[in-house]
Amino acid sequence: MKKKVLGILLTLAVTVAFAAGCGGQNPSEVQEQTENTQGETGAAQEEKDSVIVAMGTTSEPESGFDPAYGWGAGEHVHEPLIQSTLTVTTTDLKIDYDLATDMQVSEDGMTWTVKIRDDVKFTDGEALSAQDVAFTYNTVKENSSVNDFTMLKEAVALDETTVEFHMERPYSIWPYTMAIVGIVPEHAYSAAYGENPIGSGRYIMKQWDKGQQIIFEANPDYYGDAPKMKQVTILFMDEDAAYAAAMAGQVDLAYTSASYSDQTIDGYALLAYETVDNRGFNLPAVSVSTDAQGNQVGNDFTSDVQVRRAINIGIDREEMIANVLNGYGTAAYSICDKMPWYNEEARVSYDPEGAAELLDQAGWTVGADGIREKDGVQAKLNILYASGDSVRQALAADTQNQLKKLGIEVTIEGVGWDTAYTRALGEPLMWGWGAHTPMELYNIYHTLDNGTAEYSPYSNETVDKYMDEALKATSLEESYDLWKKAQWDGTTGVIQEGDIPWIWLCNIDHLYWANENLKVAEQKLHPHGHGWSIVNNVDQWEWQ
Amino acid sequence: MRRWNGRMTAVVLFAAAVIFLAAVTAAGFGFSEEALVTDFSRKNLEPGGAYLFGTDWLGRDMFVRTLTGLSMSIRIGLLSAGVSSVLAMLLGTMAAVMGKTVDSVITWVIDLIMGIPHILLLILISYACGKGFKGVVIGVALTHWTSLARLIRGEVLQLKEALYIRMAQKLGMSRWKIVWKHMLPHLFPQFLVGLILTFPHAILHEASITFLGFGLPPEQPAIGIILSESMQYLAMGRWWLALFPGLLLVLTVILFDVAGESLQKLLDPGSAHK
């Protein structure tokens, strides 16, 4: 028996040592890297022009740096750094030009004509022409595994500097798509492009040690302002390893999360950037039925619009942000807060009495056990969240506590993404959204061919109509107005006074430990995904 | 008065272990509601008078959570070890009694299951059964019977040659009657000890696959979940999230071991005079 006890203790000891080893492994590799970098720059020590950034392990692009497989244009959008794009989004999320010098759209919205610069070279010395642009777009349309390009029919190069996009349907927000698609060279594109990317952007990919780091070097022939940071090293590590690396002074900037925000690291400042990386849950807006596969669709409690309205004003978002995010977040009222297409009317204030009144009026009366009920239906919700995401779990738990005060009984359940999408059709799920394109609104609220929205049962013909019109608009300004009307036009929409099929809780600040002497350039509102957005403008960062 | 002896120590140890484990299991039932309560006004508290084991980042009382988690572990262990030992008993006896073909098939299955790393097979079965309580129990039950089955098969093979069994055969008793009347009573001590010694395995494996994310869902108070969550917070200095639940898990496993060993001493005629 002693042997067994000893065995158990040894096993534990080994486990602990192993865990410690996992955490400690990366920083030591970083150490080497840091030394190498310092060795190389050596004499230029006083004028440091390199930076080491730690990102999460999921930020490493699985399929490399090919826009067709999600680089820049994936689930989490960002500027592709290695490649140039036709347009860029500005800090206030409007559109500016990168490669493009002019763009025109035809009256019917079916043809986009874009003029590009004639002085741009790929890093292998070949000139970038309109043929490369057309090739890129036809390739991503054909191959993109992550983004929707079905609105594009084909791209045609008219001459060396003019490219024409023929559309399948009007798509007024095409400039936002053009801001994330990096232009690849037709002459050097193959299946292996992702690992050996050639572009015309600010940086050249020098080295990629899979699972560890990527090293970028400034492109000496870049057509724009020369990057101030000559070398950028991106390390991929878990949150606790990134924290340890910052504590050891091995990285210049490390991503972190709200749960670390009460810590301090000598020589580092905690940077918080506002985002449109929102969290919220859906409330199925139809009564229960069963679909062909036997899944529950709809929910008898949340199909009552008064219930959805009561929940929306019955949640104290500020308290939630203080509780769950240690204050590092902003209240969210829509999927696109602070974007040019955001309708301010979505804003509500916390009003528990008003919420209770709404429920009372709708006939949801408090029963003996403190839970409301109406016609035999109990006011019960089961809120799902992605297991393994501690922030979403905490948001769900806080929602549970807050709704209890309203007489709504909430249970929470962690689920995997394999079942989450189907179950969300009948139960609320804690989602994360937020991108630099109004298409997010369309994806959430617009009905599909089967007459209901994709992620949570809901439909409103007027909302659909505004969004269809927005896509047909001839200018972005005009489309912004229509996107706003889709949210609320004065009589109907998706906000508190309207159908409110989704409850938005907060936008999560993206937090970073940054070396005190590092001056990070002004950031645009980060989209969903705590990854590459921070280095969108790494070329403008400076050391003080 | 009788002199204190090894057998009495064994009785005391056995009783103490059983009482402690029963108390933990019962406490878990009593706290099952409370273990799920989150309260952000008391998050990240260090261990102290009000919260013996401290609280976590959702303000959950870790003492309550640990007890409930252990209780759930013990229940899972009991259920899966029970199923597993009965399976072992059945298959072990069948292999030994029902002739060559059955024996080679069962031995083959035992070798097959033993040949695959436990944890891998467990994850596979648990995942296929939809994870959760059901998945874990089925997974543990289906993977832990092999060594006991092998032991029992060997025991029965030996028994078959025993004089009293051969006499019974000559007297014309049927094969199954012999098994029932003469063999099972003889095998019972092995079975019981095997059953108890399977518990710690079952509990540790439940904790491991839950730790790896293939077991119970994360809002459940289970030891594996508590430990895997605590990993993230160690770097922030929240040592109490891992330490106390870990220690209690080790204690529980050791107590099961103590109970099993004591019982073996009590049942084994060889140690009757110690």
Image: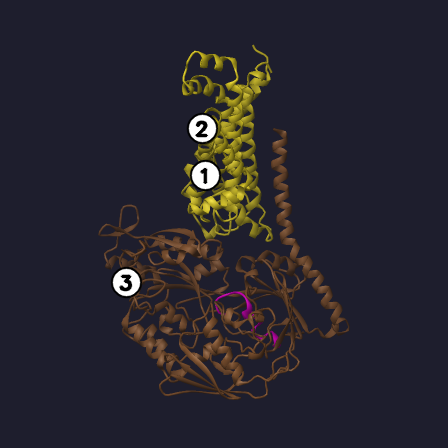
Chain colours: A brown, B yellow
Question: To which quarter of the image does residue B129 belong?
Answer: top left
Residue at 31%, 71% in the rendered image: A493
Above or below for A306 versus B244 = below
**Relative to residue A416, is residue A37 drawn left or right?**
right
Residue position for label 1:
B72
Residue position for label 2:
B90
Residue at 33%, 74% in the rendered image: A486
- Residue type at mark 3? Val
Tell which of A491 and A444 is nearer to you: A444
Residue position for label 3:
A305
Q: CA distance from mark 2 to mark 3?
A: 59 Å
Residue A304 visible in the displayed image = yes
| The residue stretch that appears in magenta | A526-539
Q: Is A27 inside the magenta-drawn segment?
A: no
- Residue type at mark 1? Met
Q: Is label 1 or label 3 in front?
A: 1
Q: CA distance from mark 1 to mark 3?
A: 40 Å
